[in-house]
Image (spheres, rainbow, N blue to C red):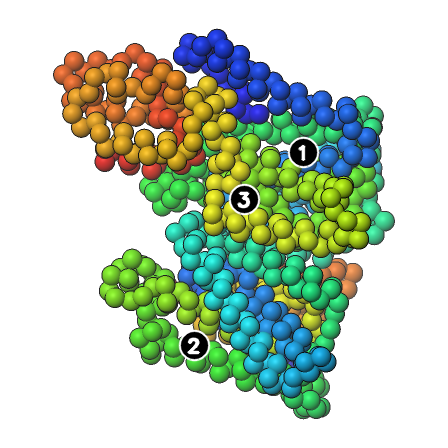
């Protein structure tokens, strides 16, 4: 039981990180961002290309370049796709983010083939063992990062005037604009931050598992969405907790569901999503924000 | 195709005989071209082309959801796949006929849509997208791995009906089913349920205020979408003759979303053309003599990028999709003038502002060749004259369905109502 919780928490950190990015975009732009996973994959691919031999840059430099690439990608998406669609119905924007994700994945496929690769970790080594589960240094960095990011964003939204401006923009762009806030800049800020966060998540996940074109969208996006909904879709601490809970639930599910039934991870996520929307659609910590 | 059907007797009087014959001839040529094409093609080409009507039915199923209701499903591969496997199961294991298997497959699609809709459609917002995404993943990983239903990797056989064994005959069967689905969709939009669904897309809260049972009609629309998807799955199954779960993955579901948007949300003809394009362009690209041989292997890798590019350009530059481009043709075929939509929109705006003072009747009425939508209420201009002009005698034609010009199709009923109040 304890090992299951530890294992679940470790796997859940990546869900929490991506879920925080999803909540950030939802708070700022009221859209389910299906391209959030791709911000991470882009960062991983750029870092991998720079780290492998012809350029052969050191890992920390490659990671910085990856983060810069992810942020640039996020800003480009905001300028070219999100802003022109800001007045169109929600369905259009949702489909557009899915289109961005598919475009990014197909470009990765054209450049990098459908191969599974491993990114070099930032810190190599054995790590420690908790309740019989080995925890690698990379995973410890990840857990620390999740806490820092959640705290930083929480303070950003509750203590700073820019955070307040972001919330105001999502609630009433016209009135916010009239009060002298440049809503276009706010929108760019939100998407840039979300993309940076997605890049951090991808670069942390890349060395833990293998990566392939679209791996974040294929393996992480749906559990992360479930975590965000579980936390209330507008709550950053909620996304943090929700992501971890999804990780634990998946681990428990893999032991409870008999082996004859395939796809226990997907079944658990589906059941969890149904339960939350049925019983408590506002989530654990959700309130209008 | 739907456009050709709309020529009730009252309107024919407005058109000259050459005008009518030109329109009938044009519609006839289009219909003949579609129905005669299979006769001139090889069997394997007919087999490939069958993908177009199947995708068109899937596109119409997505259109009920996205175009009419304003919700979105990212897990349609689950509905289509379920329909395909159920159809194969009914035909092979139970030994029933194809004509029974197809409606059963549709019912399974509708039932699973009903269950998901119960949860996701009570909420405001696009939670259906998340639920269907999760459902699609479950279908791929768990449902389609149940050996009793799918026979694992070797696939479930799905025999074609005896009358439609050849590829050419099956293509005709698919076209017939497509026409059936087009008629269903056409009648749906015209019904009370159709109006309620369009009102919900426009504004859920306003619709609820007007007495529309929002959750009921949302679930109904999703069930119709699921039914059509299940039927399309059945058609897909017996076209392939073996159902394999690899055919029903998320990428395919996203392609279906994209082709519906590119076709034009809410436009039947646009969706059919968009779906046919997405179904056939990899096949046509490979067959093109222009592309060098060495590129042929690369074509499948470019397909998703082209699809996503088309989607984004459509959404940003031309959100009405192919349907919007087709509008002048569609309107002309239905008996109206051939005119570009932008000009028309301007005219309409002027009209809405003008008639504050009593205007001579001939000016108020739309010019003779300008034909109304099938469903529009009396235009603002008539209202104004009826109120201002003392004789207060409604012109006889007004009762016969005189409406706004076809400038803004599918804009929903509520907005029109509001504008009338303001005018």
- Whether residue A83 appears in this view of the structure is yes
Provide the residue designation for mark 3. Answer: B261
Do dots 3 and 1 share one subunit?
yes
Is residue A283 visible to us here?
A: no
Determine which residue is flagged by label 2.
A153
Q: CA distance from mark 2 to mark 3?
A: 35 Å
**Mark 2 belongs to chain:** A
Task: Determine if marks 2 and 3 fall on one subunit.
Answer: no
From the viewer's side, name the closer residue of A211 and A248: A211
Quadrant housing the N terminus of chain A? bottom right
Residue at point 78%, 44% (across, down):
B243
Between residue A264 and residue A115, name the one nearer to us: A115
**Number of other residues with Cα within 10 Å of mark 2, as a class: few under 14, some 14 to 19, many 20 or more:** some
| Secondary structure under the numbered disc 1 in the rendered image | helix
Tell me whether circle 1 and circle 2 mark residues in contact (CB < 8 Å): no
Chain designation of label 3: B
Q: Quadrant of residue A173?
A: bottom left
- The mark closer to the camera, 2 or 3, is 3
Q: Residue at x 38, y 77 (%)?
A: A156
Please give left or right for residue B124 compared with residue B210 in the image: right
Q: In the picture shown, does residue B184 fall above or below A284?
A: above
Marks 3/1: CA–CA distance: 17 Å
**Label annotation for residue B53:** 1
- The location of residue A123, given as percent across then percent down, is 65, 89
> Residue A69 sits in which quadrant?
bottom right
């Amino acid at each position: 039981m304890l090992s299951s919780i530890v294992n679940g928490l470790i796997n859940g950190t990546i869900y929490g990180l991506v879920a925080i990015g999803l909540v950030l975009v939802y708070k700022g732009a009221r859209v389910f961002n299906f391209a959030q996973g791709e911000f991470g994959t882009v960062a991983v691919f750029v870092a991998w290309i720079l780290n492998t031999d012809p350029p052969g840059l050191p890992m920390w430099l490659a990671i910085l370049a990856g983060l810069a690439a992810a942020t640039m990608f996020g800003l480009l998406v905001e300028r070219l796709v999100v802003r022109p669609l800001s007045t169109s119905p929600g369905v259009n924007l949702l489909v557009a983010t899915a289109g961005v994700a598919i475009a990014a994945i197909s470009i990765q496929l054209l450049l990098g083939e459908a191969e599974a690769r491993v990114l070099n970790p930032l810190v190599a080594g054995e790590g420690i063992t908790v309740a019989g589960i080995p925890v690698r240094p990379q995973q410890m960095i990840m857990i620390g990062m999740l806490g820092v990011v959640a705290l930083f964003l929480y303070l950003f939204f509750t203590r700073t005037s820019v955070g307040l401006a972001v919330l105001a923009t999502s609630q009433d762009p016209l009135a916010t604009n009239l009060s002298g806030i440049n809503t276009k800049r706010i929108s760019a800020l939100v998407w840039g931050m979300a993309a940076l966060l997605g890049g951090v998540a991808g670069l942390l996940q890349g060395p833990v598992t293998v990566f392939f074109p679209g791996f974040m969208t294929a393996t992480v996006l749906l559990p992360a969405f479930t975590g965000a909904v579980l936390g209330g879709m507008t709550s950053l601490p909620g996304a943090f907790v929700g992501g971890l809970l999804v990780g634990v639930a998946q681990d428990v599910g893999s032991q409870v569901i008999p082996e004859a039934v395939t796809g226990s991870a997907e079944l658990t996520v589906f059941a969890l999503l149904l339960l939350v929307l049925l019983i408590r659609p506002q989530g654990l910590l959700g309130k209008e924000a | 195709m739907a456009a050709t059907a709309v020529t009730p007797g009252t309107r024919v009087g407005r058109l000259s005989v050459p005008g009518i014959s030109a329109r009938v001839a044009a519609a006839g040529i289009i219909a003949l071209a579609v129905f005669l094409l299979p006769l001139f093609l090889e069997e394997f080409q007919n087999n490939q082309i069958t993908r177009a009507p199947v995708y068109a039915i899937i596109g119409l199923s997505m259109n009920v959801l996205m175009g009419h209701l304003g919700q979105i499903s990212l897990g349609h591969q689950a509905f289509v796949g379920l329909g395909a496997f159920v159809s194969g199961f009914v035909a092979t294991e139970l030994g029933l006929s194809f004509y029974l298997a197809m409606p059963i497959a549709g019912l399974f699609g509708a039932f699973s849509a009903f269950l998901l809709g119960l949860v996701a459609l009570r909420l405001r917002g696009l939670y259906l997208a998340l639920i269907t995404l999760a459902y699609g993943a479950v279908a791929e990983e768990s449902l389609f791995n149940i050996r009793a239903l799918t026979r694992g990797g070797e696939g479930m056989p799905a025999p074609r009906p005896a009358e439609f064994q050849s590829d050419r005959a099956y293509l005709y069967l698919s076209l017939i089913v497509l026409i059936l689905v087009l008629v269903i969709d056409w009648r749906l939009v015209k019904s009370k349920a159709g109006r309620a669904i369009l009102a919900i897309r426009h504004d859920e809260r306003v619709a609820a205020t007007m007495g529309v049972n929002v959750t009921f009609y949302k679930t109904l629309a999703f069930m119709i979408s699921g039914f059509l998807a299940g039927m399309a799955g059945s058609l897909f199954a017996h076209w392939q003759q073996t159902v394999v779960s690899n055919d029903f993955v998320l990428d395919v579901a996203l392609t279906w979303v994209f082709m519906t948007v590119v076709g034009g949300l809410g436009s039947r003809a646009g969706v059919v053309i968009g779906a046919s394009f997405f179904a056939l362009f990899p096949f046509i690209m490979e067959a093109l003599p222009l592309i060098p041989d060495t590129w042929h292997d690369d074509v499948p890798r470019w397909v998703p990028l082209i699809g996503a590019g088309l989607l984004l350009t459509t959404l940003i530059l031309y959100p009405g999709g192919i349907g919007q481009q087709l509008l002048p043709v569609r309107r002309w075929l239905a008996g109206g003038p051939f005119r570009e939509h932008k000009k028309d929109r301007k005219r309409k705006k002027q009209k809405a502002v003008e008639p504050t003072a009593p205007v001579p009747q001939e000016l108020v009425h739309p010019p003779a060749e300008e034909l109304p939508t099938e469903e529009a209420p009396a235009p603002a201009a008539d209202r104004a004259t009826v109120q201002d002009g003392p004789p207060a005698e409604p012109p006889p034609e007004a009762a016969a369905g005189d409406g706004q010009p076809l400038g803004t199709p599918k804009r929903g009923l509520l907005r029109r109502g509001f504008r009338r109040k303001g005018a």
